[in-house]
Amino acid sequence: MKYKRILLKLSGESLMGDKQYGIDNEVVRQYAEDIKAVHDEGLEIAIVIGGGNIFRGLSAEKSGMDRAQADYMGMLATVINSMALQDALEKVGLKTRLLTAIKMEQICEPFIRRRAVRHLEKGRVVIFGAGTGNPYFTTDSAAALRAIEIKADVVLKGTRVDGIYTADPEKDPTATKYSEISFKEVYAKGLNVMDMTAFTLCEENNLPIIVFDMNKTGNFMKIANGDGIGTLVRS
């Protein structure tokens, strides 16, 4: 394995599968099996999931809701997704811990950095829920922050596309894919990888990002092995 400790960032939308809303249990099951295969090779895995399949704070703000209130609702949506993935992971035999930035003692542990690291060292898959616990920050920012705190080797951003392109490949058939690109090039070209706060955190802490297609079975293992799929962003 190329890495020892990784942080996997999944979007909430990825859990929908072909649905328009909510959670597709088949997609969650596939993710759990892919994660188990990589974990069985000895990697320490932490996960952050978005909540956009249930509730999006930015969209609610545009319709008139208070932004902070909307963002807190979005954080709760990430906990629902985290619980769904936790259940799927445990069904395939993995030991897990769900740690959240908002206290919910009946269902999860509060986030404590040293405790999270200890769980990883003991071979547990750690899921971080409720974002950073603060409004105005996305789950991308939470992923970057938690990855830095636990000293992860890399942030793996699992999406529906297989990397970073010169343009949106779903809209522009002439778009070409980058196999590797620097942080500065991403800034210069105005490419959308993560939100700017998350991206800057990764750049300042020399934390590489790999964008890849998580929905294709086996891709997570290929990334963990260091195969050149997806797009690598580094200094």
Image (cartoon, rainbow, N blue to C red):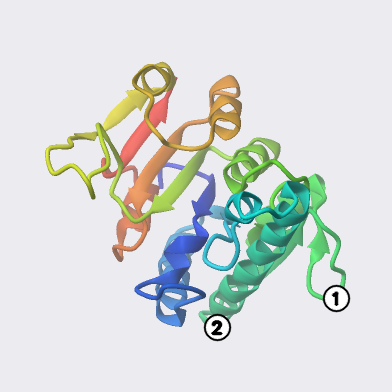
Q: Residue at x 82, y 57 (%)?
A: 102
Quarter residue 60 falls in: bottom right
Q: How far apart are the alpha carbons under marks 2 and 1?
A: 20 Å
Placement of 224 over or under 88, stated as above or below: above
Q: Is residue 145 above or below residue 52?
A: above
- Residue 154 lies, in percent from the top left, at 50, 38
Residue at image x 47%, y 31%? Answer: 208
Q: Nearer the viewer, residue 203 or 11?
A: 11
Badge 1 marks a residue whose secondary structure is: loop
Q: Which residue is mark 2?
A: 91
Identify which amino acid the numbered label 2 is placed on: Lys
For the residue carrying disc 2, how many other residues have a C-alpha within 10 Å: few (<14), some (14-19), or many (20+)?
Answer: few
Residue 233 in percent (x, y) is at 40, 30
Mark 2: secondary structure: helix
Foreground pick, 158 / 53? 53
Q: Amino acid at mark 1?
A: Gln
Q: Position of residue 71 (x, y in %)?
A: 71, 52
Q: Is residue 122 visible?
A: no
From the viewer's side, name the closer residue of 82 and 7.
82
Q: Mark 2 vs mark 1: give the one in front.
A: 1
- Say left or right for 51 vs 191: right
In the displayed structure, does residue 134 sit left or right of residue 232? right
- Residue 235 occupies which quadrant of the picture? top left
Q: Residue at label 1?
A: 106
Neighbor class of circle 1 (other Cα within 10 Å; few <14, some 14-19, many 20+) is few
